[in-house]
């Protein structure tokens, strides 16, 4: 028995036979015929969304994240057609390879694929056909949208302060007040994009999508000519016929201030430079990464929460490299000297003697998850009582077989052996990081080999090292 997910996607160009209801019905029927259980929460659906860019499909991304998680709750993903999974062959190959590494198979109900090399070839042909169709369709859509823009019609959703009603932008009073505040703070109070975002988040205001404001969100509003009645799309600008609430005079004042600020340069130095601590530091308040904020004349860097930099986090976590380095080395030294510090051990697929035993234990543990899934499928009305009983009996036999195999496997390495391996890895990392001759890349790789992340709590001045060990 396998646990599966069902992915449904319907674009605006699809016909009725590809409706969400039809795809779900056929997917569940296929699953039952092939001994696959699909819990209700594993039915993912993106409606009215193009398949060309997977990053723009939220439920698709949730499903991929779930499939790649350490819990490994999925064995198979079912789609009506491969075009529902992706219409871009490059993305299709990338995501299928990612899933293959997690032993998750992608199955098309209407496009059965034979095994072996011929099956791979057939699948590529399907992908090429889907991509050709998508490219051709996008060109037709682009022509239509260009024609609409030239007529002064609307191709995209309006910004904060508006909603579409019968194809015309209509003012949302409460959102319009937020936009007015943004222009007032920028023009009259001379606050920066960052300062405005921080203030709006403090007041509890939300963006168009219900999220927190960032400096780039504020910049988009200040620079958006939609607020003075201009419709701009793909370099085509036309006068719109809808109500506005920002005067042209106020907009031009904001534009002049923005232009002057841009000429002076960025308010904060770039945080894109490489550093041996890059990607390791985490803010204790919001969970975002701490990024390199600036470097002084001596070459020492300081780090700040990236969400704070964009106005989405209210707590500063600025900390200097001169303070971080000795604290990290001190933490490593304490572990080497035998301090009672907790850590997590993660095993790779190359684990030698006991890899088979771990695999069996993992499968036995997954049986319990599957039992919960088939119970949920019965409760949600996806499976009948008879199907639930049958699936329960199948899982019972699977568990009995796995337990017998486990009895024949040698015992795992002792806890003492793992501790010794762990300490040796920490010592090796410590020696590399503390050596003056080590490069930034060598230090980063050494630190990454033993530490998953470093959480900084500025309020309590605590640096927490989260260890793991790859055997």
Image (cartoon, grey):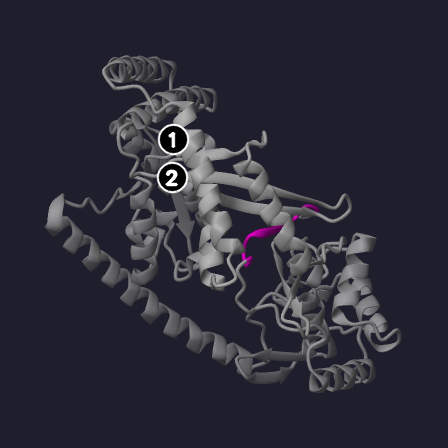
Quadrant placement of the C terminus: top left
Label placed on residue 6: 2
Q: In terms of image quadrants, where is residue 26? A: top left
- Separation of residues labelled 2 and 1 (CA atoms): 7 Å
Q: Is residue 56 visible?
A: no
Towards the viewer: 453 or 189 = 453
**Vertically, is 465 above or below 419?**
below
Quadrant placement of the N terminus: top left
Circle nearer the N terminus (2, 1): 2
Towards the viewer: 218 or 460 = 460
Is disc 1 placed on a helix, strand or loop?
loop
Residue drawn at (82%, 63%) of the image: 177
Count all numbered tags in the image, as a single digit. 2
Label placed on residue 216: none
What x and y, as percent, mark residue 4? 35, 34
* Residues shaded magenta: 277-285
Q: Disc 2 vs disc 1: Cβ atoms closer than 8 Å?
A: yes
Say if the magenta span includes residue 281: yes
**Residue extending farthest right:** 188
**Vertically, is 100 above or below 269?**
above
Say if the magenta span includes residue 72: no
What x and y, as percent, mark residue 363? 33, 25
- Assign the magenta stretch its main secondary structure: loop
Q: Is residue 339 visible?
A: yes
Q: Is residue 144 left or right of residue 118?
A: right
Residue drawn at (75%, 73%) of the image: 243
Label 1, on which residue?
A: 38
């Amino acid at each position: 028995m396998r646990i599966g997910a069902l992915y449904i996607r319907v674009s605006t160009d699809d016909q009725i036979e590809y409706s969400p209801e039809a795809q779900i019905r056929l997917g569940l029927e296929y699953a039952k015929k092939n001994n696959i259980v699909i819990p209700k929460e594993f039915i993912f659906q993106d409606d009215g969304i193009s398949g060309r860019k997977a990053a723009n499909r939220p439920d698709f991304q949730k499903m991929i994240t779930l499939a790649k998680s350490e819990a490994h709750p999925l064995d198979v993903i079912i789609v009506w057609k491969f075009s529902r999974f992706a219409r871009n062959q490059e993305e299709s190959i990338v995501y299928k390879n990612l899933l293959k590494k997690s032993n998750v198979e992608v199955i098309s109900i209407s496009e059965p694929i034979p095994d072996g090399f011929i099956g791979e070839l057939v699948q590529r042909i399907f992908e090429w056909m889907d991509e050709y169709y998508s490219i051709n369709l996008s060109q037709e859509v682009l022509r239509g949208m260009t024609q609409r823009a030239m007529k002064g019609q609307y191709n995209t959703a309006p910004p904060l302060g508006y909603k579409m009603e019968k194809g015309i932008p209509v003012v949302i009073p409460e959102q319009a007040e937020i936009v007015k505040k943004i222009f007032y703070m920028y023009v009259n109070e001379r606050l920066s994009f960052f300062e405005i975002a921080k203030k709006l988040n403090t007041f509890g205001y939300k963006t168009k999508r219900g999220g927190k404001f960032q400096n780039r969100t504020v910049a988009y509003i200040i620079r958006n000519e939609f607020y003075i009645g201009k419709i701009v799309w793909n370099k085509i600008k036309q006068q719109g016929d809808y109500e506005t609430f920002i005067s042209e005079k106020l907009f031009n004042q904001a534009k002049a201030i923005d232009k002057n600020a841009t000429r002076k340069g960025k308010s904060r130095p770039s945080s894109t430079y490489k550093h041996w601590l890059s990607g390791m530091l985490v803010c204790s308040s919001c969970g975002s990464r701490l990024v390199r904020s600036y470097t002084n004349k001596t070459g020492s860097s300081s780090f700040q929460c990236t969400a704070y930099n964009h106005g989405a986090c209210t707590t500063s976590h600025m900390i200097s490299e001169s303070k971080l380095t000795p604290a990290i080395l001190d933490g490593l030294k304490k572990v080497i000297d035998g301090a009672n510090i907790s850590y997590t051990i993660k095993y790779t697929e190359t684990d030698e003697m006991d890899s088979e035993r771990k695999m069996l234990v993992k499968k036995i543990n997954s049986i319990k998850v599957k039992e919960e899934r088939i119970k949920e499928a019965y409760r949600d009305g996806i499976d009948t009582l008879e199907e639930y009983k049958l699936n329960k009996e199948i899982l019972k036999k699977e568990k009995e077989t796995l337990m017998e195999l486990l009895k024949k496997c040698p015992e795992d390495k002792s806890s003492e052996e793992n501790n010794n391996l762990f300490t040796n890895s920490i010592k090796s990392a410590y020696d590399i990081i503390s050596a003056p001759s080590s490069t930034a890349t060598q230090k980063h790789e050494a630190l990454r080999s033993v530490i998953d992340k470093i959480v900084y709590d500025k309020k309590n001045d605590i640096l927490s090292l989260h260890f793991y060990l790859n055997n």
